[in-house]
Amino acid sequence: MKDNCIFCKIAAGQIPSATLWEDENFRVILDLGPASRGHALILPKEHFADLCELDDTMAAKVLPLAKKVGIAMMKTLGCAGFNLVQNNGEAAGQTVRHFHVHIIPRYEGGPKIVAWEPGELTDVDKQQIVEAVRAGL
Ligand code: 5GP
Ligand code: ZN
């Protein structure tokens, strides 16, 4: 547990939260500033700043849990789908530096929540990006 990390405290139950699910590794809570009705956050109980730090064993448990919660939301809240959002780094919009996954229910006719304007991929960019990233893997 990291000092002064709000999500460590919430995950440990030291700060009360609206908890949808808890097991030995994770707590799933409602987001305080929801993008839609039911917006939830998966928090590991152990502190990892972001996906780059997340232990691979824990990482392997995250998607099955997101799937379980997302399916439950569709059954019980009436959403027609859901987005998983996971921000890494301030530049990516991460405001709390404790790894978390957003589960955002999406309702028929609801607003666009996770969207961007498509750009263009030039041939030069394509080649440079593929070479650069492949070299870093
Ligand atoms: P990020 O931008 O880091 O991916 O997302 C952080 C999320 O945590 C935001 O959606 C914000 O509303 C939520 N959040 C921040 N502080 C608290 C809190 O104390 N309790 C809960 N339940 N959610 C929080
Ligand atoms: Zn933490």
Image: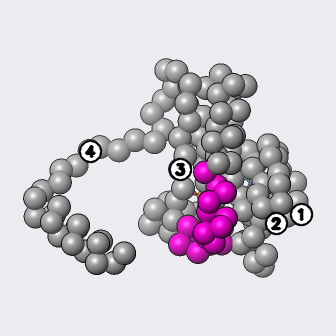
Cα separation, mark 3 vs mark 4, equals 18 Å
**Dot 4 amino acid type:** Pro
**Residue 55 quadrant:** bottom right
Q: Look at the numbered disc 3 and give the secondary structure of its residue.
A: strand
Confirm or reject: label 2 Cβ below 8 Å from ligand 2: yes
Q: Residue at label 3? A: 85
Q: Label 2 belongs to which residue?
A: 9
Tell which circle, 4 or 1, labels the residue nearer the N-terminal end.
1
Distance in Å between CA atoms under marks 4 and 2: 39 Å
Q: Distance between the residues labelled 1 and 3?
A: 25 Å
User: Which disc number belongs to residue 105?
Assistant: none
Mark 2 and mark 3: span between their CA atoms?
22 Å
User: Given the image, on which type of amino acid does mark 2 rest?
Assistant: Lys
18 relative position to 110: left or right? right
Q: Earlier in the sequence, mark 2 or mark 3?
A: 2
Badge 3 residue CB within 8 Å of ligand 1:
yes
Disc 1 is placed on an element classified as loop
In this view of the protein, can residue 25 be seen by the observer? Answer: yes
Question: Sequence-wise, which precedes: disc 4 or disc 2?
Answer: 2
Magenta-tinted stretch: 48-63
For residue 14, the mark is 1
Q: Where is residue 28 in the image (x, y as percent from the top left)?
A: 75, 50
* Left or right: 95, with 23 as reference point: left
The disc, 1 or 3, on the residue closer to the chain's N-terminal end is 1
Q: Is residue 111 above or below residue 11?
A: above
Foreground: disc 2 or disc 3: 3
Q: What residue type is labelled 1?
A: Gln
Instruction: For the residues labelled 2 and 1, say whether their Cβ atoms are less than 8 Å apart.
Output: yes
Regarding mark 2 in the picture, which secondary structure is present there?
A: helix
Residue 36 horizontal/vertical position (percent): 61, 35
Q: Mark 4 points at which residue?
A: 118
Q: Residue at x 36, y 75 (%)?
A: 137
